[in-house]
Structure formats: structure tokens, C-alpha cells
Image (cartoon, rainbow, N blue to C red):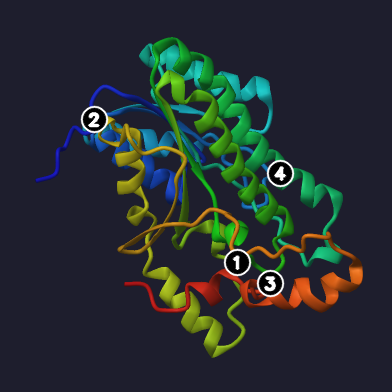
Amino acid sequence: MANQKLVEGKVVVVSGAGGGIGRDIALAMARYGAKVVVNDIGASLSGDGHNAGPAQQVVDEIRAFGGEAVANTDSVSEASSAENIINSAISAFGRIDCVVNNAGILRDRIFHKMSTDDWDSVLKVHLYGAYYMSKAAALHFKEQQSGSLIHMTSTSGLIGNVGQANYSAAKLGITALSKSIALDMEKFNVRSNCIAPFAWSRMISNIPVDTPEQQARVDKIRQMTPAKIAPLAVYLASDAATEVNAQVFAVRNNEIFVMSQPRPQRSVHRSEGWTPESIAEHGIPALRASFHTLERSGDVFSWDPV
């Protein structure tokens, strides 16, 4: 039977929690006993604008079922405002136990058309945001000798996707950041894990539907609601997950995957060393069987969601 209070008394910050995956994680955390800081600047999908409404709406939903929550509208993309987000947890609830780095924006462009601003803005929210939020929480975690960081990554970074160089670079960067935090903070009982979510949300609502095939694909994605991601996030925030660290999970509807991490696959050597010619004649032919193909996320996750 589900323990309704798996994260009882824990204080959890969820960034980008005004809608989509973040909203469902915030609601689930509160239902399982956590006190939640609902952070959202209320911007458009591309990061423009500011609106306190979405965060407050989720807080109202949480309070309606008897949960505890406060709203915060600071941006994760600056160090000082990220500190404000963590401090709002301390001032409202007296501590911080978990940060869910979920805030994100999209500026999809084919690579040769991507502007420096497209690159910078996406990196600032996703990668810098994850760093600033984690760093602001880390000192509190070290002091109390406990804490959990949950970062949203993406198969766009882990595997690849078209038109998302900025987003992919940021998301793969987050997985390396998470691993480094896990290594550095393990001695303080601090855990850091990643989730690559598959879910229909505003973040992917701009997928083109110009053909019947694209429409069919989008219809399948629509089945994967953001609520499917929340149970794993609640588990990773809980004391039940104290042995789970430095992992990368993917969640697709009712499937949970643990993702591989780069390791040597095959090697070749020559005792006399290599020349460009011997690499061409021997080295690469010997390694070629282990080459990766140019795949996108959809090529690897090619079967319908369960």
C-alpha cells in the first residue's frame, strides 16, 4: 500500500512548477507530505514575460487539499535570484531537503540559424539554473548532512534531436553536473540524480503536425501525462532512496528506464604506436563495429509507450 507520507515534513523546491511536469511534481510532493515552494516566473515557452499567476494557482491547488505551499517567482537563471528561491524555503518552512531542477525554456533552431541569444538564453535557464539552484542548496545540505537534488535532463541530450543544439548541450551538461555533485557531496549524504521525462507538456507542444505521421506521433505523446513523472521524483526525494545516487532515469508513461552512462566499448592498440595511415587501415576498421549511428531520441525509443 502506498505510504501517503513518504516525504512527510520535507521541504521541497520545484522550479518551473506553474504548469506541466513541474506542477504535477509539486502537487505529488505535497500529497505525500512535503512542504513545497512552487517556483515559476510565469514566462512564455521561449522565456519572455513574467506572471505571478501560474505559481500561485498551483499553491492554491495544494492548499485546497490541505497541503502546505508558498509561491516564488524568482528566476533560476541568475545566482542571486536562485538564492532567493532557496531562501524562500528557509524563511517559510525553516529548512530545505530537496530541489527539483525542472525550469526550462525552448529556442529550437536548426544549428546554422541558431543565434547567440538562442544559445545563451537556453543555457542560462537549464544548465546555469540547475547549477545556481544546486549551489544555493548545497551549503544547507552540507550543514544538515542530508539532501536530494533531482534534475530534469532529456533524451535530446542523452541521445540526440534535430534543431536543439542549445537544449541538448544544456541537458547533457546537467547530467555531468549531477554526476559531479554526487561525487563531491556524497560524504555529506547528499544525492543527485537525473530524470529524462517523456510527457506531453507546453515544452513539446510546438512539435509540427503537418503530416498524418507527425499527428499520429503527437497523439501518442499526448497519452504520456506529466503526472507519470511525479512518482519517481517523490521517491527520489524520500529517505527510501538514500542508496540511489548519480543515476540517470527515463520515464515514459508506465515505463521507467535506467540509462547507460558513457564507458569504453572497444579498444585497439599497436605496440609501435599509431600513424594516420595505420589508423585508416587498421584502427578505424577494427572499431567501426562499435560506432554509434546518427540517431534521434525517437529512433531509440521507437516502440509505442506502454
Kindly check if marks 1 and 3 are in contact, taking CB atoms under 8 A apart as contact.
no
Q: Quadrant of the C terminus?
A: bottom left
- Residue highlighted by disc 1: 206
Q: CA distance from mark 1 to mark 4?
A: 20 Å
Label 2: element kind: loop
Residue 166 picture location, percent across and down: 73, 53
Quarter-wise, where is residue 211 in the image?
A: bottom right
Q: Which residue is mark 2?
A: 33
Which circle, 1 or 3, is nearer the viewer?
3
* Viewer-closest of 251 and 186: 186
User: Distance of mark 1 from mark 3, alpha carbons?
Assistant: 39 Å
Amino acid on which the number 4 mark rests in the picture: Leu
Identity of the residue drawn at 52% across and 73% down: 300
Q: Earlier in the sequence, mark 2 or mark 4?
A: 2
Q: Nearer the viewer, residue 245 or 64?
A: 245
Crowding at mark 1 (Cα within 10 Å: few <14, some 14-19, many 20+):
few
